[in-house]
Image: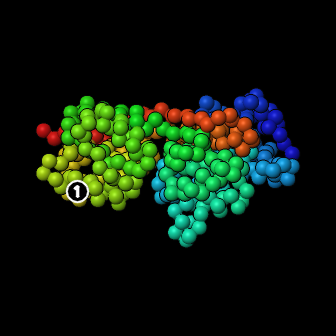
Amino acid sequence: MPTIRDVADRAGVSKSLASLALRGDPGVSQARRATVRQAAEELGYRTDRVARALAGTRSGMVGVLLNDLRNPWFVDLLAGLTASLDGAGLAPVLADSATTRQIGRSAVEQLRSQRVDAVVVVGTTEDGDALRAASRDGVPVLLAGTWDPDDLGADVVVNDDESGATAATRHLLALGHRRLAHLNGPGRVGELRAQGFRGAAGAGALVVPGGMSEESGYAVARRLLEASERPTALLAYNDLAAIGVLSAAHDLGLDVPGDVSVVGYDNTHLAAIRHLSLTSVDNGTFAIGVQSGRFVAERAAGTGGGPRVHRVAASLQVRGTTGPPPA
């Protein structure tokens, strides 16, 4: 059976670099990662998870708890997470908490029945009680892109949500906007983004519940944009809600960005579609996934020390949905 040393020799790199490349480390260039992965494929290199499980108590599987498979943000994070887990010899097992809850089952308990070595919570979840029980029973839990539930003593890997919302708001202020509104979302992430918005726009800035979906973004934006003193700029909780805002503006005959500017959050692939060209906050989703995989691999191996918090820097990707306010 080929080893990581064999892969490194075939790719012409060091053993440590080959390991980092297979783990999806963002410090390794895409070209070098491709070379190492090609060498692994040519040699048929695979981590023998079954043998490792038989040799000890680890299954080699990590449960990944998702809440909304329609949101492309999850896909971007999973790309980084799975690359990192694969490099550590771990296999992700996905569970949709929303779907299992609808049929009266617990996604966390479903994952635990498969003897996963750890659980990664991706985004918001309503399975707090089951996660607390798992944590009490010694199952490592990691929060990826969320702070909730906040009483687990778990590792947390998140975007710097407050600074991301601050950057987006300052961009709108620099364009000349003074009537701003933020369509806020749930949980601690929503609180931090609202703090960033208010800190930049002022305490009297309008913050309204906007939800996480296109439908909720549309409903709230339509109500705001039909007002006599409508906002000239809207910051949505995520890209899906922002697309709902764009649809509401279109249905009301408003030009974007001539009549109203719109900013999303997450910088998913939807934002870059030319027809949308959505200005959006890039929250380093892939990097969140990679770091989450590193932390959870250490926990699964019984190492890592006390609870850790890792923040990924945010940046603003300016596109075609923001401009000066109407004259």
- Residue 37, picture quadrant: top right
Chosen colour scheme: rainbow
- Residue 219, picture quadrant: bottom left
Q: Residues within 10 Å of mark 1 (few under 14, many from 20)?
A: few
Pick the residue in front: 269 or 142.
Answer: 142
Q: Residue at x 37, y 57 (%)?
A: 214
- Residue 114 relative to residue 247: left or right: right
> Which image quadrant: the N terminus?
top right
Q: Residue at x 33, y 53 (%)?
A: 210
Q: Residue at x 26, y 34 (%)?
A: 202
Percent position (x, y) of residue 302?
Answer: 74, 40
Residue 250 visible? The answer is no
Q: Is residue 251 above or below residue 56?
A: below
Pick the residue in front: 300 or 227.
Answer: 300
Task: Indicate the amino acid at tag 1.
Answer: Arg
- Looking at the rendered structure, the secondary structure element under dot 1 is helix
> Which image quadrant: the C terminus?
top left
Q: Is residue 217 above or below residue 286?
A: below
Percent position (x, y) of residue 217?
Answer: 33, 55
**Residue topped by disc 1:** 223
Residue at far bottom of view: 103
- Residue 227 relative to residue 312: left or right: left
